[in-house]
Image: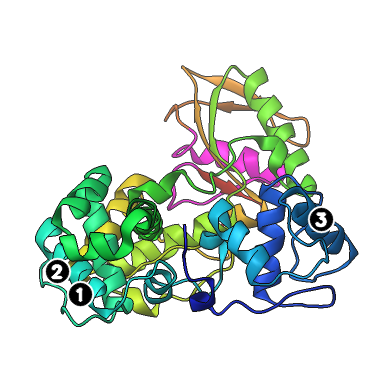
Amino acid sequence: MAFNVSALRLPLIRRGSNNPFVLAWQRFLRDQKFPVGIPDGDFGPNTDRATRAYQEKNNLGADGVVGNNTYGVALKQGLLFLLPNLNGKNLLSYLRFGETEIKDIQRSLNQVAQLPPPLTVDGDFGPRSSKGLAEAYKKRDVRLREELENALSSATKNKLGSDFAPALDIFNDYAKKLRFRLSGEHWYKRFPTSDSISSLTPSFRWRVQAFEKALLDAGCKIIVTATLRPRQRAYLMHYAARIDRRQIAPWRVPRLGGVDIDWVHYTNAGSLRAAQDMVDAYELGGNPVSLRSNHILGRAVDWIITWEGTIQVKDARGRMITIGGPEVGAFNRQLWNVGRSYGVRKLATDPPHWSSNGY
């Protein structure tokens, strides 16, 4: 493959460098099983040793300097999609697509995906074209690679020659990555909420465990559905709901480090539909998820508590409290009072939710 590394405008990095490209390089070395330590963007002694080991393994000059020769090998091994400055335009330049070939790509995407509205065929693969590429993969999925190959002209194939197939593979992988950055129900499985009481903060955990023991001793059945919620998941839930309710435009959602989601689809209708799909997947009701909730702090538990008939529950003072119906903790205020004695307080407006302060 004779791709154009210079088109990516990658800086020379070496010991002492500190920038996002170093971070990408460290992540690449880690993925290649070189002992680089924790990626932090600082090209220190560990990164220097790992770089030299990588260069030696790949028959490169083991000088610890990452320039175009080292980049050229690493890009083919997975570094490409870790780059902080990668976009559709410089990717196609790297793959040796010129203006004529980019126009061919744009025409082919319009043909294959029937994009509404169609991409402007101008030979400039900017942000709008990248959105169109993500939309095309969303619509055609694994069929996109073959359909693009069939749609692209003989002139494009002839210009790329033996590099055409690997270039199209890389371009298709990029399309897939763009597509799965888009918001949608597939984000539901990311950053899962714990359902273990042991993940709660210690000061609240022992209160919950004491209350739980009293409930079990009384014959209650308990199903824990949520405890510690990662802040990333809260972010996804919060803004999916706000977009769905038209409280914020998708392009105005602030970014959160570690969550590489793209809320803006090819069309606004697509953005709104994806947000609604997320709301449905998260089963968000009328209570918007807070970005600073007790779940994020490890001071809340969602659980379903049920029993049959009349039970005797010991409160934190050791008194036996008689509790009848309703036989579900979400609506039984007598049980709420017992929970309060342990420091586990019920939020009345959220059926399964109990916390350290009732919120």
Q: Are marks 2 and 1 in contact (CB under 8 Å)?
A: yes
Spatial CA span between label 1 and label 3: 41 Å
Question: Disc 1 designates what residue?
Answer: 103
Q: Residue at x 16, y 51 (%)?
A: 150
Observer-nearest of 105 and 315: 105
Q: Residue at x 54, y 49 (%)?
A: 191
User: How many marks overall?
Assistant: 3
Say whether residue 331 is magenta: yes
Q: Secondary structure at mark 1?
A: helix
Observer-nearest of 336 and 13: 13
Give the image's coloring scheme. rainbow
Magenta residue span: 329-352
Q: Is residue 249 above or below residue 108?
A: below
- Identified by mark 2, the residue type is Arg
Which circle marks residue 50 in the picture?
3
Q: Please state if 135 lies on the left or on the right of 11 as rendered.
A: left
Classed neighbour count for the residue bearing mark 3: other residues with Cα under 10 Å, few (<14), some (14–19), many (≥20)? many
Which circle marks residue 88 in the picture?
none
Q: Are marks 1 and 3 in contact (CB under 8 Å)?
A: no
Q: Which percent across, then down, holds residue 27? A: 67, 57
Q: Residue at x 24, y 59 (%)?
A: 157
Question: Disc 2 designates what residue?
Answer: 107
Spatial CA span between label 2 and label 3: 44 Å
Q: Which percent across, then down, holds residue 351? A: 44, 44
Q: Please state if 64 lies on the left or on the right of 218 as rendered.
A: right
Q: Secondary structure at mark 2?
A: helix
Q: Which percent across, then down, holds residue 172? A: 34, 54
